[in-house]
Image (spheres, helix red, strand yellow):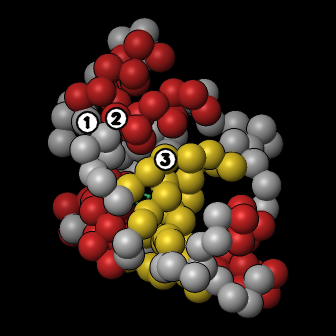
Amino acid sequence: MKNIAIYPGTFDPFTNGHLDIVMRARLLFPSVIVAVTDNPHKKGDFSLADRIAMVKEAVRNIDNVSVDSFKELLVNYTNKKKARIIIRGLRAVSDFEYEFQMALMNRNLSANIETVFLMPDEKYTYLSSSLVKEIARLGGNIEEFVSEHVRSVIFKHFKL
Ligand code: ADP
C-alpha cells in the first residue's frame, strides 16, 4: 500500500492555515487527498461545491495533491482510497483534546490507519475558519488569512 494521506476537514472556508498543512503533508507523502466533509448535520456557511472549489483553486498547481469529498465514516473512506494516513493540523493545546479523542476513536474503528499531526507556521496558530468569517463580516482585513479567491467567495456569500 502506498502512503497515501487523507487530509479531511470542513474547510468552511479553506484558509492559509489549512494550506500550510497541505504543503507540509505533500513533502512527507507521495500523494495527499484533501477530503472535504459532506456532512448535512454540520451546519456551515458555505456549500459543499463552494468549499471544494476553494480547495481546488488553492492546490491547482500542486502535482501530488488532489481534492475530493466524502460522506461516510472517515476511516471507511480512508480504507476505500487505500490510504492509511490521516493528516490533522494542531494549532494549540486547545485542539489537542478533541483531536486526541478522534485519533484514538479512528484507531479503534480501523487499527491499520495512523493519524499524523502537523503544526502550521506560528503565524497561523491563531487562525480559524470561524474567526476569518467573523472578521470579514465585521469589515476587517482578511488578506493575510485566505487567498484572493476565498476572499471573493466570502464577500459574495456575505454580500460584503
Ligand atoms: P473539522 O471540522 O474537520 O475540524 P476544519 O476545517 O475546522 O475541519 O479543520 C480541518 C483540520 O485543519 C483540523 O485538523 C484543524 O485542526 C486544522 N486546522 C484548522 N485551522 C488550522 C490552522 N490555522 N493551522 C493549522 N491547522 C488548522
Do labels 1 and 2 touch, CB within 8 Å?
yes
Q: Which residue is more in the foreground, 54 or 154?
A: 54
Q: What quarter of the picture does the C terminus occupy?
A: top left
Which residue is tagged 1?
147
Position of 79 relative to 151 (above/below)? below
Residue 107 visible, this orientation: yes
Seen from the viewer's position, the closer of residues 4 and 159 is: 4
| Label 3 residue SS | strand
Quadrant housing residue 134: top left
Residue 152 is situated, as x and y percent measured from the top left of the image, at 32, 20
The numbered dot on residue 67 is 3
Task: Give whichever of discs 3 and 2 has the lower sequence position.
Answer: 2
Across and down, in percent, residue 94 comes to 49, 73
Three-letter code, disc 2: Glu
From this view, report whether residue 125 is shown above or below residue 93: above
* Image location of residue 23, percent across then percent down: 28, 62
